[in-house]
Image (cartoon, rainbow, N blue to C red):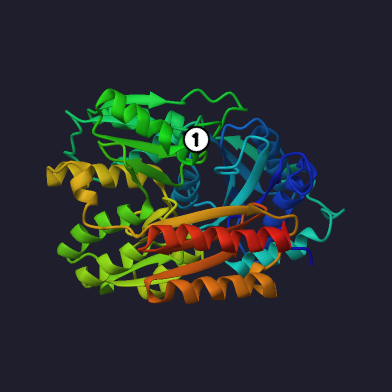
Amino acid sequence: MRRFFGTDGIRGVANAEPMTPEFAMTLGGAMVRQLRHRGAEGPGVVCIGKDPRRSSDMLEHAVASGVASMGGEAHLLGVLPTPAVAYLTNALGADMGVMISASHNTFADNGIKLFGANGFKLSDEEEQNIERLLDDALPKERPLGADVGQIILRTDALERYKAFVRATVDGDLSLSGLTIVVDCANGAASAVVPALLNDLGATVIALHIEPNGVNINEGCGSLHPDVVARVVGERGADLGLTFDGDADRVLTVDESGTLRDGDYLLAIFARPLKEAGRLTNDVLVTTVMANMGLDLDMKALGVELVKTRVGDRYVLEEMSRRGAVLGGEQSGHIIFLEHQTTGDGVLTSLQLLQVLVSSGKPFSELASVMTKAPQVLINVPVSDKVDPMAQPGVREAVEAAEATLADSGRVLVRSSGTEPLVRVMVEGFDEEAVRRQAETVAEAVRTLLA
């Protein structure tokens, strides 16, 4: 059986295998067939959202056609953030949700993310069941006449999501007096975030809010936080928010233009939750990429820091096992399980602004609760997706680096779940040694795998 799903759905170059309309149509049909196998009542309702890249319309219609061809009902939600699909799938009583997006990738790529009826990403088992159905083409025996499915355009999706996110913070929250720079990456955040912050009274400086299908993530957004940092400095703003293409994550900069990633956000959010007795079991869940500084900060706070493999789905699974309400990734995927079933950059932004307003402190002071250890991340392009640690030469380089750093640092080498890259991460409190060891390990990866 061929594997299609990675750590965040299916992803590839749009209109090339597997990200073709033919595949998308087969996937749509397989989803409805999977719902039938599970004994779902009714036709099988599937909500479909998309980001604004050019190929999203093509894939959206293909998935919807596959759903309808098997008698299902496809609800088209339009352009909106990935977490909006997660929320609306549950809120509308649908059986499954689909997001057409390649997140932070360039516009030429696209992807398909699936959600269950409860708004959570599908389990590995459910994805494997769908992959088995993908081994076969759509069956010849299909519904006919009145049993053919429908495709329904929803015009209320975006407003429903905005109302939901707004309801997760205090009703009297006012952002009056705050100047906020927002970089929407010419993506799904464009139609949501500036309007939401304006409604709350903020002075909003909105960047990259004119998606044309080919400019998503182009020199902007969370891959280029220096853009929003520069404008924060130029305009004397209080903070900056920068999103990826589908707005399921956010990176931030403080009033000095200093980047404050997901590690800082988790440290900031953990405190008021613990003080209010709402940090269930005093547990915070993150990934192996989290900085050593977060370990030290949570230990001082009396919070257990649990680390998973990279991917917000794995964070969420561990949160469910531990009964945790807060978790996330350094990359800016933050999960507030009290409110949402997946990483949500828009919701995270409002939660941060509420903490900022209630504290009366500048963002830099809030972030000062954690001191980061120097961390170097090098992405090495590779031709084949293999386990780098299975290569003796890479393993030996890692072991040598770990011996050199001893107890004052650590080394992590892993394959990207979404791109043909091996990520080499080294951190420790001796910045020069960290950089030197990162380059050495990265060179071993290049020599053996590039």
Picture coordinates of residue 205 (x, y %)? Answer: 33, 24
Q: Amino acid at mark 1?
A: Ala
**Left or right: 198 in relation to 131:** left
Looking at the picture, does residue 23 appear above or below residue 303?
A: above
Answer few, some or many: residues within 10 Å of disc 1's Cα (few below 14, many 20 plus, some between 14 and 19).
many
Q: Which residue is mark 1?
A: 188
Towards the viewer: 278 or 372: 372
Residue at 25%, 65% (x, y): give it.
297
Q: Quadrant of residue 259?
A: top left
Viewport quadrant of the N terminus: bottom right
The secondary element bearing badge 1 is classed as helix
Residue at 64%, 52% (x, y): give it.
419
- The answer, for residue 314, to whether it is visible in the render is yes
Towards the viewer: 296 or 310: 296
**Left or right: 213 in relation to 194:** right
Q: Quadrant of residue 443?
A: bottom right
Picture coordinates of residue 115 (x, y %)? Answer: 55, 55
Towards the viewer: 355 or 415: 415
Picture coordinates of residue 59 (x, y %)? Answer: 69, 39
